[in-house]
Amino acid sequence: MPAAFPAPCRLSVALLLALSALSAMAQDDPRHVEVKDLDEVVVRATPLPRTAENLTRPVEVLAGTRLDEAKAATLGETVSHLPGVQSSYFGPGVGRPIIRGLDGARVQVLSDGLASGDVSTVSVDHAVSIEPFLADQIEVLKGPSTLLYGSGAIGGAVNVVDGRIPERATATPLQGRAELRAGSGNDERTGMLRLDGTSASGNLVFHLDALHRETGDYDIPGHAESAALREREHGDDDDDHGHEGEGAYGTLPNSFVRTDSAALGVSWVGERGFLGVGASLFNTRYGVPGHAHEDGHDHDDDDHDDEDDHESHADEGVHIVMDQRRYEVRGGLDGLGAFDTLRVKLARTEYTHTEYEGDAIGTVFDNDSTELRAELVHRDWAGWDGAFGLQAWTRDFLAIGDEAFVPASESRDVGLFWIGTRTFGTVDLELGARHDRNRIDVDEDEAIGPSRDFSATSLSAAARWHFGEDLHLSFGLDRAQRSPTAEELYSNGLHVATRSYEFGNPDLRNETANRAEIGLHWHHGPLKFGASVYAVDYRDFIYLADTGVEDGGTPARVWNQADTRFTGGELDLQWTFLDNGTGRWTLRGFGDAVRGRLDGEGTREVSFAVPHGDHFHNYTVDLAQDGNLPRLAPWRAGTELRWEGGQWRAGIGAIRYARQDRVAEYEDETPGYTLVNANLAWHLDTASGRALELFVDGTNLLDEEARPHTSFLRDLAPLPGRSVAAGVRLFF
């Protein structure tokens, strides 16, 4: 697989031709709405229509120009500048949201209210199958969202609203947007087109979108390997200029990305509801930097024969090809007597993820899932407005290959919930309850444990006390449960992505989170201030623990369970200090911090066996039940200056990520770093209703070496160095 792709992008030519034809057809200006106050955006992630300002639970929303400025190649990077939200990193093709220190199987990623259907929770090298460039708005629910979305949302949820199945007629017969962009640091070429239209009768509505992205290997400020790793493995062998020695320098090999995404949706829309169908595809091919498979030659001499098949690819790069096909049916009906609305969503997803070692196929992951969701919103019942919900899903998972560390499994889950709100004077109260039944079936001859059944119950209470129009105080109490995943229960073998052996625990129990949170929101004139503090006590928290064992140079990790306590806080301050003939000037500052500690006593004995051909190396270790959790995001603080004047807008900001020195046992500290970004855009509205926008975005302008503590690749692959992207957006 080449590290870079040719610069010309065939889709770009097609887009330009399409735009030249379509621009003459557009009549009005239904397109781009600049969102001055994101608190006024209606949040789609909850069945009860509420704005971000009125929701009792903590939420962040990206829409309008703020979303345009934040959009990145991965969903995690797109939302990473919101308070309390960071991103995982496994090369430029993989970035999953981390909410308040929690990620993976605790953060649900949604496509307009339904699960994405990928397997990004199985392994840190698996990408999320949602393209943020095609989003209308992105909503981040912080804190337990199990009430709405089940076990996988105990740490929060990220809902991407893309409108791929229309629910209402468009404002004009045809409207849309398009974007072309190119980047310097990785030779990026991206083209995107979206069309929405309504028939002359007003009943038939369609949606069409397409995206193509190509990037080559990206530039880095220095060495691919960290200074600590070079010293540990190679000694201090740099010359005076720092260019020599082991490893890559200046460019990160095997960090390319190529992505294609497309969708078609059609709906019949009437006075009382809609019925629509849609189909979409998502295909991405990306390199895994720092991941030539080196596991074979590191083992003891008596194991060399067992690993010859790995050695043949030891110097070849690893890349991944991911393909997903998704089919959806959605319908809604309004005015049902005692009920306001009924919404039903059904999605079938077929997903394949293939890992290549050079040109040879290493491991194939297949994941077929079906999800049904129904929401019935009722009218005032004894003063309560609320909604009943049903969610059911199935997942058939299969991994094939010598490095398939998770056995095949079939998962089934059914959940029922109710959520209701009521106002008592100046206090808005929200209550909710949910119960789930989950079963995981495995071939017990191949798995390390039996099939399992789980029941999970979640309860939630939240209140918002209005001291006036400008000031309110919010409180939240939750009791949420999460059942273990198949990966946590049954992993057993070499996990190449993390360069480690992983061993599950088939005896894991439900984990239970008890959360308390207090938040303050003040909005007065040019000032807007928000702050929150929270504490979460987990019973039987499930985490991947380092054992201190290295078998042939490869570390062994086990899924363990212990009581844990998370504490943290967030703040966000915005001040429009000048709004006159020179433009609108806004200064923003934000910060967040989270601390996660094991809260048990003593040690827990665990045993595992590392396979070597027809024999095993057996180990027994004691795991401490106290101390810091591994790979926890450090605190950070950021500032941003924005200016809007006439047709222009600009911004510059910096975020300081602190040194992470509160590390787990067997884990190294990670240095801090500062990222400086800037943007500039010129917007022109035409008399015919069309609009043109030219933009320039700069990232990591100080060209600083940045290695996120949350990344398994932090010693092998830093974040990209300085890069400038420029392009054009068209709205019609």
Image (cartoon, helix red, strand yellow):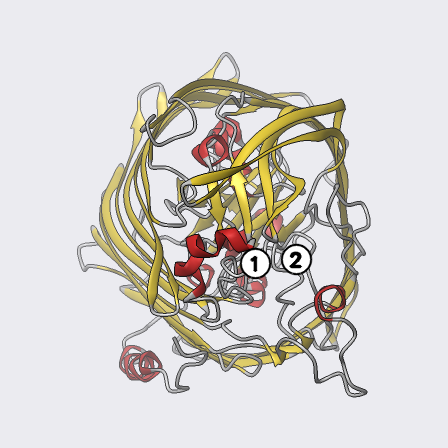
Check the image and report above or below for 567 versus 582: above
Q: Which residue is mark 2?
A: 81
- Disc nearest the viewer among 2 and 1: 1
Q: Is disc 1 surrounded by few (<14), some (14 to 19) or many (20+) residues within 10 Å?
A: some
Q: Is residue 339 above or below residue 153?
A: above
Percent x, y of residue 489: 48, 30
Residue 1 image position (x, y, % from top left): 38, 75
Picture quadrant of residue 544: top right
**Residue drawn at x 73%, y 25% as measured from the top left:** 603
> In this orientation, which residue lies closer to the viewer: 360 or 514?
360
Q: How many marks?
A: 2
Dot 2 or dot 1: first in sequence order is 2
Report if residue 519 is visible in the image: no
Residue 662 position, x and y percent, is: 80, 45
Q: Which mark is residue 298?
A: 1
- Cα separation, mark 2 vs mark 1, equals 40 Å
Residue type of the residue flagged with mark 1: Asp
